[in-house]
Image: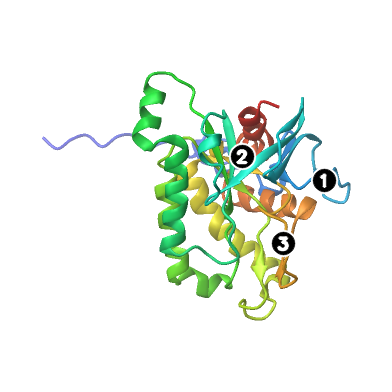
Amino acid sequence: MPPKKPPPLPRSLFTGGGPLSPSALQQPPSPSTVHPAFITDAHSHGVPLEHFPEVQNMPRVTGSVAVAVGAESSGSGKHRTVAACVIDGPDLQDATTSPAMDLVVPCIAPLTEAGWERVDEAVNKIDGGREKVEMEVAEGTPSRKILVSGLLPPPLTKRSSPLLHSDEYEMHCGHLSQLSLHSDVVLKALPPIVDTRVAPAAWWEDAHELERVVKMYIGPAIEAFGTHRIVFGSQPALPPTDPAIIVPVSGAAWYALLRKCVSELGEESEAMTAIMGKNAEEVYGL
């Protein structure tokens, strides 16, 4: 005996205000409506981000961290100055007892294989290696956080189309994924730099193209690290000292660009608040 055919569903379920009608389905929020509850500027060089009324719906800046290589950490409350180490610096070992430390990758071009190896060596020197970190997590021992700057995004060289098919982009995404296996590593999303001597024509002056390139780096970083291990900063890893090195976007304009990229990648307000404020507040204890 053939199985009975189930009764047809009433059309009212799918039309008008029915529970299965297109109008009843919950739509994701529009990217233009996704904003953080507050901002913590986790990377400046003495002048933290301020509120700019011209940046639409920009929330209040509740805390800031000024980063200086070789300086003494100082300050308390919501505003701090922290000492940073560079990946080849002699003070890496001295910083291993700090609950959180800044590690700067000083580069003006995308890292080579040798450059990524130096980053890995520096991180391993600080945290003792992934196995040690995993053991600390398993034992419930709070592990230090290593805040890495200079990699998100790396120095920009190419437009989005040639970048997508380049070896440098494939290498960056692969090594970034490997770095994410260190659960104590946090990435700083900072304004990019451009070496005008090697980058072709001023393509970064096209705001839409700059946004596409930045988004190409932010997407894989979120996929590898999650939104709970990325923090916003308003200034590049190190202030440029060479006039050929430019910073095409920084400060409030960088906030607006990063917010747009993160929201268009599908993240909602909770994740946006984590990246723009909450993560840094927790890591630095602001």
Which residue is the site of mark 1?
A: 47
Label 3 with label 2: CB-CB less than 8 Å: no
Local secondary structure at mark 1: loop
Looking at numbered disc 3 in the image, what kind of residue is underneath it? Pro
Local secondary structure at mark 2: loop
| Residue positioned 61% across, 64% down in the render | 212
Q: Farthest residue toward the front? A: 90
Q: Farthest residue toward the left? A: 1
C-alpha gap between disc 3 and disc 2: 33 Å
**Badge 3 density bin: few <14, some 14–19, many ≥20, Cα 10 Å:** few
Which residue is the site of mark 2?
A: 268
Q: Farthest residue toward the bottom? A: 201
Query: In the picture, which quadrant includes the C terminus?
Result: top right
Q: Which numbered mark, 3 or 2, is in the foreground of this view?
A: 3
Looking at numbered disc 2 in the image, what kind of residue is underneath it? Glu
Q: Is residue 251 left or right of residue 144?
A: right
Instruction: State which tag comes first along the sequence, 1 or 2.
Output: 1
Q: Quadrant of residue 70?
A: top right
| Residue positioned 64% across, 40% down in the render | 272
The one of 116 and 138 positioned closer to us in this rendering: 116
Q: Is residue 131 left or right of residue 50?
A: left
Which residue is the site of mark 3?
A: 240
Looking at numbered disc 1 in the image, what kind of residue is underneath it? Val
Instruction: State which tag comes first along the sequence, 3 or 1.
Output: 1
| Residue positioned 69% across, 37% down in the render | 82
**Res 27 visible:** no
Local secondary structure at mark 3: loop
Image: 170 above or below 3: below
Query: In the picture, which quadrant includes the N terminus?
Result: top left
Residue 176 location (% of width, % of height): 45, 52
The one of 50 and 197 positioned closer to us in this rendering: 197
Q: Which numbered mark, 1 or 2, is in the foreground of this view?
A: 1
